[in-house]
Amino acid sequence: MAATEHYFESEDLHPIDIVETLAEHHAWDFDRVADDQIAMAVEGQWRTYSITLAWSPYDETLRLICTFEMDPPEDKLPKLFEALNATNDMIWDGAFTYWHEQRLMVFRYGLILAGGLTAGAEQLGRLIAASVQNCERFYPAFQLVNWGDQSVESAMQVALAEAYGRA
């Protein structure tokens, strides 16, 4: 039994209720925006990531959006978009995009829970951890492309080395 499972004994719990309990357990700053939405701040090595999870009962999907500020020079945007394509080819769980108007790098993931499926604390904890890990892994590569005058290929090697360099 996982450490967080003892908090949840009913399978009828709302996924946002579970996420709220996880946020309390990890002492993350959070705000229960609505019954179906929670926003929180999770500290990483490189940044503090803003994570929002929203439940859509209509399509039975839990949507995660993890953002961090990034304001690349306008002339670097084509290289950034090339780096985003390369990044998305390297990950299976979610995708990155850049919201230019808001100056935000965004990692998105949708967990479909159709047919009455439920997500447990362990699965939701891993979902949040994976989003932060992906942001941490690729943040240096995005920085190198935007401000380090590195090629996309060279910057992606940093992301690869990071994945193998941690214990």
Image (cartoon, rainbow, N blue to C red):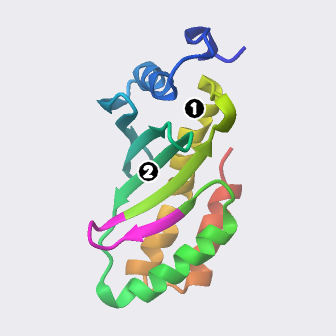
Q: Which residue corresponds to the image point at 68% horizontal and 18% vertical from the top-left?
A: 2
Left or right of 67? Residue 31 is: left
Q: Which class describes the residues within 10 Å of circle 1: few (<14), some (14-19), or many (20+)?
A: some
Magenta residues, start to end: 96-104
User: In the shown orientation, is residue 62 left or right of residue 118?
Assistant: left
Q: Amino acid at mark 2?
A: Cys
Query: Does 14 appear above or below 141?
Result: above
- Taking 48 as reference, is 6 above or below it? above
Quick check: 3 above or below 149? above
Q: Mark 2 or mark 1, which has the lower sequence index?
A: 2
**Does the stretch in magenta take in 18?**
no
* Quadrant in which the N terminus appears: top right
Using the image, tell me which numbered label, if any, was put on residue 66. Answer: 2
Q: Residue at x 44, y 45 (%)?
A: 44
Q: Give me the residue at 61% from left, 36% from top.
A: 126
Mark 2, Cα crowd under 10 Å, few <14 / some 14-19 / many 20+, is many
Picture disc at residue 125: 1
Q: Is residue 46 visible?
A: no
Name, please, the residue furthest toward the front. Answer: 58
Point out the image quarter for the C terminus: top right
The residue sitting at 40% across, 33% down in the picture is 36
Nearest the viewer among 153 and 38 is 38
Q: Nearer the viewer, residue 37 or 132?
A: 37
Image quadrant in which you'd find residue 75 = bottom left
> Any magenta on residue 103?
yes
> For residue 130, which quarter of the picture?
top right
What kind of residue is marked 1?
Gly
Residue 9 in the image: state x and y as whole percent.
62, 8
Is residue 17 or residue 79 the one in the foreground? 17
